[in-house]
Amino acid sequence: MTSLPGEVKGFKDLEQEVQKAGICGKCGGCVAFCSAGEFHALRSEADGTPVMADESKCLHCGICYLICPQIRALDQELREKLDWKQPIGPVRRMASARASSQRILRVATDGGVVTALLTFALKKKMIDGAIVSRPVGPFSREPAIATDAESLLQAAGSHFEESLHVHAVGGMYSSFSPSIKEVKSLGQHGMRKIALVGTPCQVFTMQKMRLLQVLPADSIKLIIGLFCMQNFSFNAKARRALEKRMSVKLSSIDKLNIKDDVIVTTRKKDVIHIPFEEMDTFARPACFACSDFSNEYADISCGGLGSPDGYTSTILRTAEGERLYNLAKREGIIKELGLRGRKARQDHYTEMMAKIVSFSRRKQVRAAKTLREAGRGA
Ligand SMILES: Cc1cc2nc3c(=O)[nH]c(=O)nc-3n(C[C@H](O)[C@H](O)[C@H](O)COP(=O)(O)OP(=O)(O)OC[C@H]3O[C@@H](n4cnc5c(N)ncnc54)[C@H](O)[C@@H]3O)c2cc1C
Ligand code: SF4
Ligand code: SF4
Ligand code: SF4
């Protein structure tokens, strides 16, 4: 059943347009808002599937529909608000940068810029905490609220201690972390200035919540977005298939990174590159309908693509993002890749931009095909 003309679209429409179309990412956005607003009409099943818990409590506000990342409603309004530009959203400046702290660099995924900026923002009391995602095993993460430098370090990077492999046994592993769900607990923590680290789908939902000025999005003061080609989920059978593909056990993985392919480093320091196409069978179905690679609605976007190993490709998109980055750079918290001369700098950033645009196009084409096949049009 879909809404009648003129009727506000709501959860029934999400069931129809998103869940039945097989593109629900189980991000928890719809449930997080409905619970934070104290409506409690929705709840999440154990596997993250949102369901109507009590229809009589539904106020037909339509917000669960509007904020779903798979619904393009409000896209135009957001683009206007954020001064979005072709081809990859607003770009004030780009840099290949890394943290100065050796502690951060040792655990970081790339150059540790995300962790360094959050640690700096906490120290300067620009934020009270950050919604991050901590590793609980290879290809497995869970959301967490970090309020000190130590917990930010624990969430950084994709190195896996042996103990984490024990934690993530059985059931489903997922590299997708439903961070938006954490937003609903912010009120209980009494925090007013929060940073969110998230994938483009999470950032899209959060920006729509901010646009609509719905609680608890008003606490989010800074958004650091990660580049994202796709996220993965594995049941036991898929884990065995992946181990076969890599010819190593998941328990032998030391580090995992995603740049222009998936990069697995084993404890013996062997490096295995797996092209995205070969990882498609492990990707979450929702990811095939997603068209944003470089996190176009974040304050600052970070990825590995386009930078040398050990550096983070950093896109400063908003005045707030640029201010934080410049302050951190001035205080020596962040260092940029040394490039001699104007031409070397120009060549580097032209190449970085070309790579990011190319991956963005790849994702847009894939999403258009998926949505066509799901009967949702491009
Ligand atoms: C699922 C996923 C896919 C990605 N795909 C690409 C890609 O295709 N190409 C590319 O160039 N870069 C990709 N990235 C980004 C890249 O892996 C690094 O996260 C980025 O370069 C920042 O590196 P850093 O060293 O500055 O971050 P760090 O200082 O190591 O901090 C990383 C931060 O990311 C958070 N985080 C980690 N995983 C998740 C998650 N699943 N959800 C929400 N937050 C998370 C951590 O909590 C931490 O705060 C992807 C990241 C993720 C999580
Ligand atoms: S109350 Fe609003 S957010 Fe909750 S299910 Fe109903 S329409 Fe959706
Ligand atoms: S908001 Fe997230 S969990 Fe809810 S229907 Fe949309 S994709 Fe699924
Ligand atoms: S590919 Fe898109 S839907 Fe999938 S995790 Fe990344 S941003 Fe979210």
Image (cartoon, helix red, strand yellow):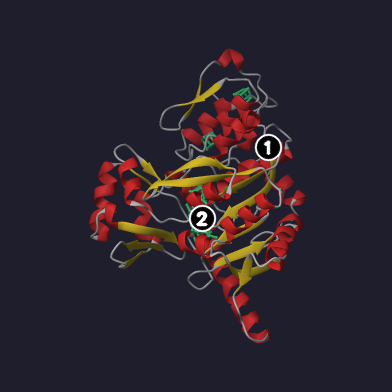
Q: Position of residue 165 (x, y in %)?
A: 32, 47
Q: Is residue 2 visible?
A: no
In percent of the image, x 48 and y 50: which residue is there?
154
Picture layout, residue 38 above or below residue 174: above
Spot occupied by residue 175 in the image (x, y as percentages of width and height): 42, 47
Please, what secondary structure does the residue beneath circle 1 have?
Answer: helix
Residue 52 pos. (x, y %): 52, 21
Q: Which mark is residue 217?
A: 1
Numbered badge on residue 228: 2
Q: Is residue 191 left or right of residue 373?
A: right
- With 265 as the anchor, is 130 left or right in this view? right
Q: Is mark 2 within 8 Å of ligand 4?
A: yes
Callout 1 amino acid: Ala
Q: Quadrant of residue 64?
A: top right
Callout 2, which amino acid?
Answer: Cys
x and y, in percent, of residue 39 in the image: 62, 20
